[in-house]
Structure formats: C-alpha cells, structure tokens
Image (cartoon, rainbow, N blue to C red):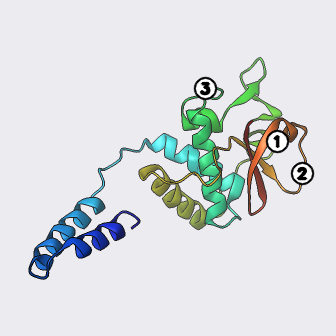
Amino acid sequence: MRILMPLMFLLFTVSCDNQIESNTEELTEIVVTAQRLPEVQINSDELECLTANIYFEARGEPDLGKLAVAHVTLNRVRSKSFPNDICGVVYQAKTNSKGNPIRHKCQFSWYCDGKREVIDEKDKYEEIRRLAHEFLSAPNEDITDGAEFYHAVSVSPFWRKSFQQTVVINDHIFYKKG
C-alpha cells in the first residue's frame, strides 16, 4: 500500500485530462502485478519448528507477541552465532553424553524445562501455523529491531545486562548484541 499510493498520486498529478483513463489502466496493471508475489517454497519441517516455538513461547500473546518470537527465531537463523536453520535454532541445546538436552540448558526454555510438550489447543496451534506460514511467505519489518534474545517481564535473567534492550512487546523484553 505504501508503494501504490504515491504512484496513484504521481500519475494523477502529471496526467492531462485526456490521458487520465490510460494512466488509470496502467496503474491497474501495476496493482495487479504487485499483488502477484512469487510462490515461496516453505519447508514443512521448518514451518512445524517455527509453529511449535511460537506456540510454546507465546500462544497466549496477541499476534504481535507471536510475530516477535518468529522474528527472534529468524534473526538467530541469520546470525553466525546460531544454527543456520529454524529447527536448529529452536532445538539448540547443550546435551548430555546420550545426546539428550540438559534441563534448563536450551535456547528456548520450553524445549528442556522438564515438562512434556503437549499441544492441547489444536485450534490455537492451527492459527499459529497459519501465522507462521504467512510470516515465512512474505517479507515483513522486524518489529524486534534485530533482537536475538528475550525474556518474560516477570523474570530478570543475569545475561540481560550483556545486551542492548530493543523493545518491550506484551509480556516480553527483547535484546540484541550491543
């Protein structure tokens, strides 16, 4: 919408009365072209990993909070300090000699908090899957300003002072490397 509105204004102001109709048709072509985005191939495993992460980290949050978790996950994928795929980021953990995650030594606490991960709100999970699919399908502005870390406002982890706070969204505070 930001792109189309200036085009409409520009076409209207530079047009002569007898050319408005042809310019309007030209604008229609631009609008139709802009709406036909290329089909993005989304890896189903990556989609499920992102959906699970959003579900267990932020299912009670409004969409903005859910999107913030998605942004942190993708910011980590893009960082050299983390695995380079969504599932690798979501399930990153220190492991014991048997390869099992060590309790409370994971990047996302839900993965190794000792509780069984049960998806008991199927409708909520499907809603989050649609949101995650849309998030991965289209580029969007990073609402966390590049954050790779966050925590609930109810806690004060020791590591927070090592990073620059970027934003508070709902019940979470977000940080990036300074």
Q: Are marks 1 and 3 in contact (CB under 8 Å)?
A: no
Residue nearer the viewer, 69 or 105:
69
Which amino acid is tagged 3? Lys
- Please name the residue that numbered disc 1 is placed on: 114
- Distance from the alpha carbon under mark 2 to that under mark 3: 27 Å
Q: Is residue 156 visible?
A: yes
Using the image, determine if residue 42 lies above or below residue 82. below
What kind of element bears circle 1? Answer: loop
Which residue in the protein does label 3 denote? Answer: 80
Question: What is the quadrant of the N terminus in the image?
Answer: bottom left
Amino acid at pointer 2: Val
| 97 and 34: which is toward the camera | 34
Residue 89 percent location from the top left of the image: 63, 35
Foreground of the two, 163 or 22: 22
**What label sits on residue 155 in the rendered view?**
2
Mark 2 vs 1, N-terminal side = 1
